[in-house]
Each structure stands twice: as structure tokens, then as C-alpha cells.
Amino acid sequence: MTPRFHWGVHRATGGPRAVLTYIIRRLFAAAVMLVVIMLAVFSIFFLIPKWTGVDPATMYVGKQTDAAALEGVREKLGLADPILVQLFEFFKGILVGRDYTGGGDTYHCSAPCFGYSFKTEQAIWPILADRLPVTLGLAAGAVIIWLLIGLTAGVVSALKRGSIWDRGAMILALGGVSLPIYFTGLISLAVFSYGLGLVAHQFTPIEENFSAWFSGMILPWVTLALLFGAMYARLTRATMLEVMGEDYIRTARAKGLREGVVIRKHAMRSTMTPIITLLGVDLGALIGGAILTETTFSLPGLGQAVLKAIGERDLPLILGVTLITASAVVIANLLVDVLYGVIDPRVRLA
Amino acid sequence: MTAPMHDTVPVESGDAVAAADVTKKDVEGRSLGRIAWNRLKRDKLALAGGVMVIVLVLVAVFAPFITSVLGHDPDVRNEDLIDPLFQTPKGAWGGISSEHLFGVEPGNGRDIFSRIVYGARISLLVGFLSAVVAVVIGTVLGILAGYFGGWLDAVISRVMDMLLAFPQLLFIISLISVMPNQLIGLHGTGVRLLVMIMVIGFFGWPYVGRIVRGQTLSLREREYVEAARSLGAGRRYILFKELLPNLIAPITVYATLMIPTNILTEAALGFLGVGVKPPTASWGNMLSTAVSYYDSDPMFMIIPGLAIFITVLSFNLFGDGVRDALDPKGSR
């Protein structure tokens, strides 16, 4: 066994340069993912309607059957153009902005251009920019609570395997993964907010009043975090149990380390590795949960916007929300990955 | 090239289980199914879950019979049971009586029990069939990636990684919102069911694919595969006769654990108003209506919520049991 200094880990894997290569590779992967997402969104909104025999123009116009109006929309949005031209315009609009020409007028839509709402005729981007912070605030708070609940419960359960605490926590966790967010949300709203009056039931923007915002966000945070927290508690426990059975834990104990050190320095580190990987993957699922939570608690975020848009068949808005949320997930994932590569040197070699 | 694997699913093949079991008292050959069943029999919680699952399936299959015996069609409105002023059911607890076991819906007085029974059909149908879609795609692509390796593996693995990180619910919502009302001979509810099954299944396949790929990778190096190959077995023989039987255990476990997730997704879509639409009864769309009555008629919210909870919990208990029974290490 070669002696290792605490900073030797970096040396062994090539130091800062390896980190840089790793980060560049992750950046590239994220860029590819963004392009794929844009392609997927484009296909959903422009290709699939074609295959299923729906004229996108009629979806934009809604119930009107005025032939002239349809023609106008088709011309304005370029729906009659070849599909590749449409795709190019779509990408161009997002990256550098685009012009819409219709009925002799030209509108410039500056980047990032997601088009105009068909309901309100507003540009989509400002609507999104307005609502994004609400969703991000919800997601970020939930992630913190979920990791706290999940990791603590999982680690303690694994260390005290078979105890009352372990059994109780695991029964709660099993219940937690089986409870739909919208159900727990509605019940907690009825009990804690309307029934006991402990927390606010209305959303206040963060810039208006921080404590009111915080009070209004507690229930949504906890509701959203419960589902994931329960999942992570189960996963952490299983991983931790497996790690504690490994030979190097026995070795660490054999050389006389205190149990606390064995757990903190040896077991925890290996347990965290798969959990953090999973966290990156689950950010996409978190967005789904956030949509449900926003609907349950009437938070004015992206989820609520997209549902309203579906009701009104406001396609540009649906498209914008889908794209912006998917991009947020990719970026958050990238951050997790980079952080992970810095923390765990083995990842860079993979 | 290795894709990240972080699952709590058994990753040993059947013969390893059999080998581990030889040390037990009887040495006579026992199939993997037999061993698993013996373990499952001892797990009370899993059995309870399994019984509940069977009951739910029976309820779904015989829904028309059950409702006709009790005499309440799920679509018949009983406006005489509704308070004309508040639109809530007359009587306490949301109108629960010996006649209407779970009460009636506010606003229109439809029998909640019948609607829950019919809602089970939608939930289970979407839950099962989308799992089937996911298992079929995942198994085929997982075996291809694991067995052939190379660029095929690289492409399939990257696609899986990408799909796993996708905000699925959002994509499902937008896909359903651009679907027409009529498609290949189906209308309204039929189209929505078909789209939900296909889309939920599509986003589920990478979970199965990863497991199958990892398994195939380790199995194809085993001696018995090598032996078959040296005896001149064709590629198809090795894939279907040597590899696939050993993949059944992990696939079964994952499929069982996938059904409850799919049921939750279906209910979520119903709740968001993009799933099956009323008057067709589904648990999700009942909850969605219940939102507007949650302080005046909380029972209407609690009943479909509990239906979802109990169903998902039963599947989870049963799935956990099956996993433990098939897991040779017997941990957890």
C-alpha cells in the first residue's frame, strides 16, 4: 500500500487539468442534451400534429374557422414552409431572435424568442421570466428539505438496523412513496393552513415580503420534499447497509479507528456517491412534482402557467415552458455533475 | 464504457441463487420460482400486498357486475341528494349511507363507490400496459446494448441517460395536449388512454434497459454462454435460450415496482386535467374536481386519495416482497 497524503488524490488523477477535461466533457454533454430537447419540443409541437393530421394553424387559432384567419396564421408563423426551414427559424428565434412577417407588418421578437401567446398576444419570454423564480424557489427549498430528511432517516435507520426507529422510519417511508403529492398537499393545506391557521395559504412574492413568502412556501416545500425524502431514505438505508458490509470497513475497524470515524470518513463517503448521481437524474422528476405542487397550492409558477395554457390551447406558451424547464434541469444537472467531479476524483476517470 | 448503475434490484442470476441454496437441508433441485415462492410465503406484508393487488384486479375486471348488483350506475346523477344551495351532498360525511357506501359527488350526486370501482379499471389498465411497453422496449434495447457492445451500446446508453434526466411529466403533458380527439379509430377517452400508455411506457423503458444491459454484460461472459457458443449455438439461440431466462428475475422485480409509479403518473395527469376526462371516472379526475370542495365536502377528496394510496402501497409492498424473495443476498 502506497502512503497517501491528503492532497495526493488530485495528483493521482492528473490534478486540475483532469478536472478541466471533465468539466468540458460535461459541458459538451449538456449542450447536446439541450439540442435534443429543442428537437423533441419542436417535433411535439410541429411534427406530430402533421402526422396525426392536425393542422397546427387550427390549434393556434382555436375554434375560429375563418379561412382567411387560418391563412394569416400559417403565413405569419411560417407553417407552410418546409419543415427544415421551420426548424431553422425555431432555433434561430431562441438563439438570436427572429422576425414574424404577416399582413404587411413585421414584428421583431428578440432572443430568446419563444413566439407570442395566442391568448394574450404577449411575448412568451417575459411571462416565463416572471414565473421561473417561483418554480426555482419551490424546487430549491424542496431539494434541501428532501436531502435532510432522506439522508438522516436513511443513515440512522441503517446504523440502528432492526430498531424501533428503523422500522418506524421505513414504514413511514413506504407510506411516503405511495402518497400522491396532490393528496398530501390538499390535506396539509386543509389541516395546517385553514384548520389550524399555522401558516399562510397564499403566495407572496419573495421581493415583496420575505417572511410572508417563507410562510407560504413551507407547506409546498414539505409536501414536495416528502415524496422524494421517503424515496431517498429507503435508498440511503439500502446503500449504507451494503457499504457497512464491505471489507474496507472491517479493515478500518480492525486498525482501531473509532466507530464514529469509520462511519463519517469511510462509510458515508461511499454511500453519498450513488445518492448524488441519483440527485442529478431526479431533478427532471422534481419538475414534474413541482407542477403538481404548484397546482395544489396555487403557486404562480411555470407549472400553473403550463396548465392554464393547456386549458386555453395556448401552444406557444406550452412550448416555452417545456423548453425553459427542460433547460433548467440540464443546467442544474450540469452543476451537480461538476460539483460531483470536484468532490469525487474517481468520477473524472470514468 | 459504463453507464451509472444505482439500483436496489437483484443483480444475480438464477443459478447463483440455486447454488447458494444447496447448503440448505434438501439438495433436490428446486427452481428459482419455487425458492422465491418459499421466501415470499414467509413475508406477511408482501402477501397482504399481493392479496390486495388480486382484489383490486378482480374489482376492475368485474366492475360492471359489482355496480349492477349494488344498483348504482357510475354516470347516473342523483340531484335529489344534493343540497341546492351549497351544491354539497345532503347528510353528514359527504352523503355516506347504506345506499351510497362512499357517498355521492357534490354538484351532481353520482355514486362515488361506483365511480371508484370504475376508476380502478383506468388506473390498473394504464399502470399494467405502460409497464408492459416499458419492459418490452427496455428488454430488447438493454440486451442489444449489453450483448453487442460497441457503438450500439454507446448510443443506447446515452439515450437512456438522457431520457432518465428528462422532465417526463412536462413532456407527457405537452404530448397529450397536441393529440387530436380521434386517432386510428379511437375517440376521446380511447385516444387519451392509448397516448398515456405509450408515453408513460416510453419514458419508463430506460429504467428497465439499464438493469437488463448491466445483467447482459455480466452474463455474456459466463461459462455456460461460452460453452453454448463453442458448441456452435447461434446468436439467436444464445440471446433467447441462454440469456433471456436469466434476465426474467430482475425484469419481474422492476416491472412490479414500476406499476405503482405508473399509476401515480396516470392519477397525476387526471388531477392536472390532461388525463381521462369526466364523465369517464378516474381517481385522478375525481381529485381534481374535489379541489373546489375540499373544505365543504372533504370526503370527496379523501376517498379517491385513499384509493390511490392503498393501490400504490399494495403494489409497493408486493414488489418489495418479490424483490427480497428473488434477491440471493437476502439483505434488506
Image (cartoon, coloured by chain):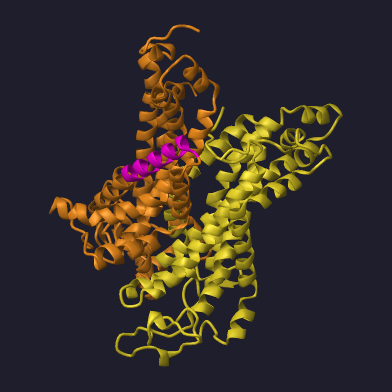
Q: What residue appears at the point 52 percent right and 21 percent down from the top-left corner?
A: A250
Q: How many marks?
A: 0
Q: Nearer the viewer, residue B30 or A183?
A: B30
Percent x, y of residue B281: 50, 75
Asked whether B200 falls inside the magenta stretch, the response is no
Percent x, y of residue A233: 44, 43
Q: Quadrant of residue B53?
A: bottom right
Chain B painted colour: yellow
The answer to whether residue B199 is visible is: no
Asked whether A144 falls inside the magenta stretch, the response is yes
Relative placement, left or right, of B161 versus B301 is right
| Range shown magenta | A143-161
Question: Residue extending furthest bottom?
Answer: B80
Position above or below: A91 against A247: below
The answer to whether residue A264 is visible is: yes
Q: Nearer the viewer, residue B26 or A90?
A: B26
Position above or below: B224 against B187: above
Percent x, y of residue A118: 31, 64
Q: What residue appears at the point 46 percent right and 22 percent down from the top-left corner?
A: A346
Q: Which chain is orange?
A: A
